[in-house]
């Protein structure tokens, strides 16, 4: 089944539905985000390590492997990811000159161990945690096409089935031609503890996120390390990490009240609760304002009768009319 059979959706403002809650907002985690130039003046990064055949092009990417046979490279966070709920958005690029034969692919890791090279797309086998594979080479015939995105939950004891490309071990997968596209290719991984694991990919058009898979009731290990690795064999490709943006996801109840534009002074609350008390309070305040205005007007008329009709700061022509207004007759009755 190809990704074209899935519904194409765009995530807006992180309002992702989770049962009776939503992801209300996200907070970026600097410790697990990565952008150009990737390294500091000492040719290191405070939060990330890279090694094996990987190297950094400070203007473009971290290249995990070049388009050469038998290469392997990795990139790992130095600190574990402690957020309970998170969103990871990875911009990557898989490219090369091979028109028909290319591979093998790369992987995104959320695992107990870090920076341990091995045969599974450049990292260790029998891993504990989550792996998302971006597989570009089919080792056997399948009823679906490659390139393909699949995921596996490792228990620390089970080996990845290389010969069958992990078929039957995945918790979700889709086919998507993310290799050599005309737009930036991105993967977005959203995880909510006791909620779901959701994977989307951008490869067709800018800001168009295509659903790959969504798995309910997935629980990952606590505080995994975030990593990336890639491997080439007899066939090869360039495997690049362009940027990584990681967010901690903040949940809120779906029925939480929010301020809405256009709310009037006497508008009712969305759920209809507690509105009458507020209405009477507002009504009492309005009555008080009216009473104060009426009293002020009556006082103004009373004083006006005794002062002979002068205006505040206005002129009084001639000499009659009692005291006149403030600043009134004294100015205009003066004779030279």
Image: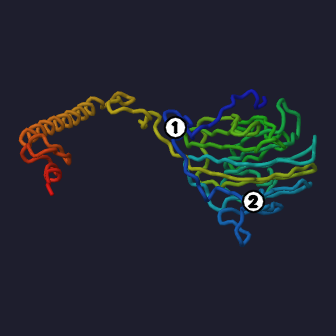
Q: Position of residue 20 (x, y in %)?
A: 49, 33
Q: CA distance from mark 2 to mark 1?
A: 36 Å
In the visual, does 233 lie left or right of 60?
right
User: Which badge, 2 or 1, is on the more N-terminal residue?
Assistant: 1
From the viewer's side, name the closer residue of 306 and 199.
Answer: 306
The residue shown at (59%, 50%) is: 247
Q: Residues within 10 Å of mark 2 (few under 14, many from 20)?
A: few
Q: Which residue is identified by label 2? A: 116
Label 2 with label 1: CB-CB less than 8 Å: no
- Under circle 1, the secondary element is strand
Q: Position of residue 334 (x, y in %)?
A: 14, 54
Q: Residues within 10 Å of mark 1 (few under 14, many from 20)?
A: some
In the visual, does 211 lie left or right of 319?
right
From the viewer's side, name the closer residue of 315 and 36.
Answer: 315
Marking on residue 7: none
Quadrant including the C terminus: bottom left
In the visual, does 161 lie left or right of 253?
right
Q: Which residue is identified by label 1? A: 22
- Under circle 2, the secondary element is loop
* Residue 71 position (above or below residue 149): below
* Quarter occupied by residue 116: bottom right
The residue shown at (70%, 54%) is: 227
* Quarter occupied by residue 162: top right
* Residue 218 position (above or below residue 59): above
Mark toward the viewer: 2 or 1: 1
């Amino acid at each position: 089944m190809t990704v074209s059979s899935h519904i194409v959706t765009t995530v807006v403002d992180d309002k992702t539905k989770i049962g009776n809650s939503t992801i209300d907002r996200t907070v970026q985690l600097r410790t697990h985000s990565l952008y150009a130039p990737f390294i500091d003046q000492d040719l290191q990064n405070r939060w990330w390590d890279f090694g094996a055949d990987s190297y950094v092009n400070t203007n473009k990417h971290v290249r995990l492997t070049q388009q050469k046979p038998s290469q392997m490279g990795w990139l790992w966070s130095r600190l574990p990811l402690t957020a309970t709920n998170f969103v990871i958005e990875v911009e990557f690029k898989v490219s090369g000159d091979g028109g028909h034969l290319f591979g093998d692919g790369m992987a995104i890791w959320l695992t107990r161990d870090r920076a341990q090279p091995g045969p599974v797309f450049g990292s260790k086998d029998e891993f504990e945690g989550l792996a998302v594979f971006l597989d570009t080479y089919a080792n056997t015939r399948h009823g679906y096409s490659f390139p393909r995105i699949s995921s596996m939950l490792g228990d620390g004891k089970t080996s990845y089935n290389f010969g069958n490309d992990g078929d039957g071990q995945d918790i979700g997968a889709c086919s998507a031609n993310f290799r050599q596209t005309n737009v930036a290719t991105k993967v977005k991984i959203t995880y909510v503890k006791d909620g779901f694991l959701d994977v989307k990919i951008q490869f067709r058009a800018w800001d168009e996120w295509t659903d790959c898979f969504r798995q309910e009731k997935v629980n990952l290990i606590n505080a995994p390390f975030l990593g990336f690795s890639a491997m080439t064999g007899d066939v090869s490709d360039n495997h690049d990490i362009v940027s990584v943006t990681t967010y901690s996801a903040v949940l809120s109840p779906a029925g939480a009240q929010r301020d809405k534009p256009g709310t009037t002074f006497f508008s009712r609350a969305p759920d209809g609760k507690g509105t009458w008390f507020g209405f009477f309070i507002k009504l009492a305040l309005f009555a008080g304002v009216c009473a104060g205005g009426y009293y002020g007007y009556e006082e103004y008329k009373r004083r006006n009768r005794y002062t002979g009709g002068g205006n505040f700061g206005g002129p009084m022509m001639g000499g009659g009319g009692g005291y006149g207004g403030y600043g009134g007759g004294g100015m205009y009755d003066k004779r030279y």
